Image (cartoon, coloured by chain):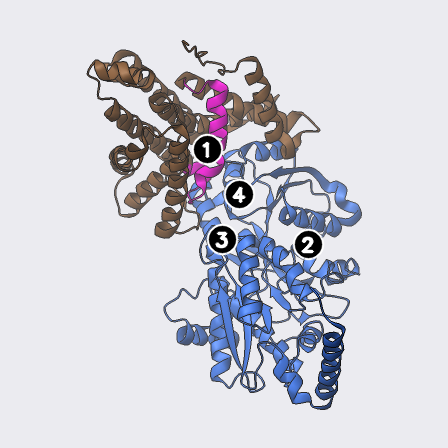
Chain colours: A blue, B brown
Amino acid sequence: MFISSKQLIGSVAAAFALVLTSGATSPLVAQSVPGVTATEVVLGGLHPCSGPASAYCTIGKGAAAYFAYVNDKGGVNGRKITYKDLDDAYSPPQAMQLARQLVEQDHVFAMFNTLGTPSNTAIRPYLNQNQVPQLYVATGATTWAHDSSQYPWTIGWQPDYQSEAIIYARNLLKVAPNAKIGVIYQNDDYGKDYLAGLHKGLGPKSSLIVKEVSYETTDPDVSSQIGQLKASGADTFFIFATPKFALQSLVIAAQQSWHPTIYLNNVSANDVVMKGATEKGGATATAGVISVGYLKDPLDPRWANDSGLALFKQIMAKYAPGVDTSNLFYMYGCGAAYTMVDTLQKAGRDLTRQKLMDAAIHLNEANNPFVMPGIVVQTTPSNHFPITQEQLAKYDNGRFVPFGSIIDARPIIASESK
Amino acid sequence: MQELAQQVVSGLASGSIYASMALALVLIYRSMNVINFAQGEMAMFTTFIAWQLVQQGLPLWAAFTATIAVAFVGAVLLERIVIRPVERAGPLTIVIVTLGLLITFNGLAGLFWGYVIKSFPSPFPAAPINIGGVAFSSQDVGIILVSLASLGVISLFFAKTKLGLAMRAAALYPAASQVLGIRVSWMLALGWGLSAVVGAISGMMVAPVVFLDPNMMQGIVVYAFAAAVLGGVESPLGAVVGGLILGVLLNLLGTYVEFVGTDLRLAVAFAIIVAVLLIRPAGLFGRVSVARV
């Protein structure tokens, strides 16, 4: 490319003029922010509605329902939210292409709740390079917080996998300080994140772990791994696995007549897994399995008269009629969308991407109606883990019954995130 | 000692899963000298049909029988409609067509039944069996017995029936068979039908163990390829033995070789298979093919 000196001088002068005028009149700045007008703010999202992970599609629907409800109430700072939620089929290359489309063609103001560790990892460099906020990604990897100095425009929402494992470890050290622990984990970043959290939570007592085994997602079954854990003499079993392999682990342990105390990661602590395992492995396969929760489970009778649950049901009935509201993913979508609206509100009427990011790292949200009372959605510039509190729950008679108080992993996890 | 026994038994159970699928691959290979990459997805798809029939209230064995019939007819039709036009186009074209079928069946299953894992009823009792501290399920025993039974029936069919002989002839000497009055093209379709039946049985046997979803067979079919090649891709007996060896080998490597562990056992097992093939290129039970030039 050749630029004559005359053209160069001209363009520099023009740039100067632009800087001068824009500094003088602030409305011009507001207009130049992509995706923001006086009456509208555009957000982009990615959820898999086809492909192997399409069960998560409902999260986007839950969020969209909450935005529709807010819009009917007048929107945020006078602006209605337009949520462009696309299907990336849980495929990183598709996520990349759609993220470009959302940023460059649809001119979204920010990305909200894009789902999946692989997809978010793929689009993170691009979004950060273009300084597009990537808010409240739907994955529990610790990298969103731990690598925030390198990627300051990205932040998670849900409890991270390490925090969850730390909470299990603290519970275990209290109730069974001499436990012999066996662990099965998925041999990738997701499984290793949990394993690292368990080691952190146990601290000097990591020696309680007598056996760690891994599986590949291509393994047909995990009977060999369970056999090794049983032979190691472990009496406590941590399952850091996706639903299919968690289900197999529960069933095979029962079939091999191994009945340890079981901790099951939140990712797989759902109806499909627990009912399936009970059916195949008998009631002993699932009785007393321990997991965690942080959202208000619509099936939990504790919330029968709760105003948050009533609001959830009212929103879903009006803006997503006919869906199965016992599905916790809708609750997740509403909860994350609530924090998003809260953040937009705090960023103020004079909206910029920088202000939005500032608001996202100064969260102090004690009143999210969709998460359990007592849990504060909280961030600071040096701590990018919005939710670190969870409550333990034990599987009993067809559902998870919460017990104990809400436990906070923040003291341990935050000390790592400098 | 008890752990060793447990690992061998688990290995035989996993191995019989690979073996049952490998049998279906061998059947197709025997009838047209090409590997059908869609074999696993066809098995998965027919298993979903069985699941649907059970959901509709059909008794398990009736659903099994109906599914086997559907698998046979469906695969014969598939061969007539999709494979026949490219029958003479060379192996590479057929391989690409089967890859297309793989993607199609996977997508269709997702479309019809979704991606949420489903539990599939087992024809065998659920109570675990425990002998001297070694535990396994009656499902494990069932898969091994069914694989061996399939092997027996297939061997008898090829060795003792005229139809079986005709199929072998059609695959080995198509032109000569044609002259002798064998309808070579229909023998191919029959091969597809039979292998789909074996695949359907395999799918319905493994689904209670690994749980049913559209990606159920993708991991298994890779192991089945390995088992078939190890045993000799033309030999049904080789497929079964190869599957069982692979299952036990993986477990023992993962448990007893410290630096291999569960992380590396797959890579090491495949390296061992490659080493075996270097010494016996036709596989353990394969015939060395001799071409007259």
Mark closer to the chain start, 4 or 2 = 2
Look at mark 4 in the image and give the residue it sits on: A245
Assign a secondary structure to mark 2: helix
Cα gap from disc 2 to disc 1, whole angstroms: 34 Å
Look at mark 1 in the image and give the residue it sits on: B221
Look at mark 3 in the image and give the residue it sits on: A53
Is B175 situated above or below B210?
above
* Subunit of label 4: A
Assign a secondary structure to mark 3: loop
Tally of numbered discs? 4
Look at mark 2 in the image and give the residue it sits on: A162
Q: Which residues are magenta?
A: B207-234
Amino acid type at image mark 4: Phe
Q: Is residue A350 visible?
A: no
Q: Is residue A19 visible?
A: yes
* Subunit of label 3: A
Residue A290 among those drawn in magenta: no
Q: Are marks 4 and 2 in contact (CB under 8 Å)?
A: no
Discs 2/3, front: 3
| Helix, strand or loop for the magenta stretch, by majority | helix
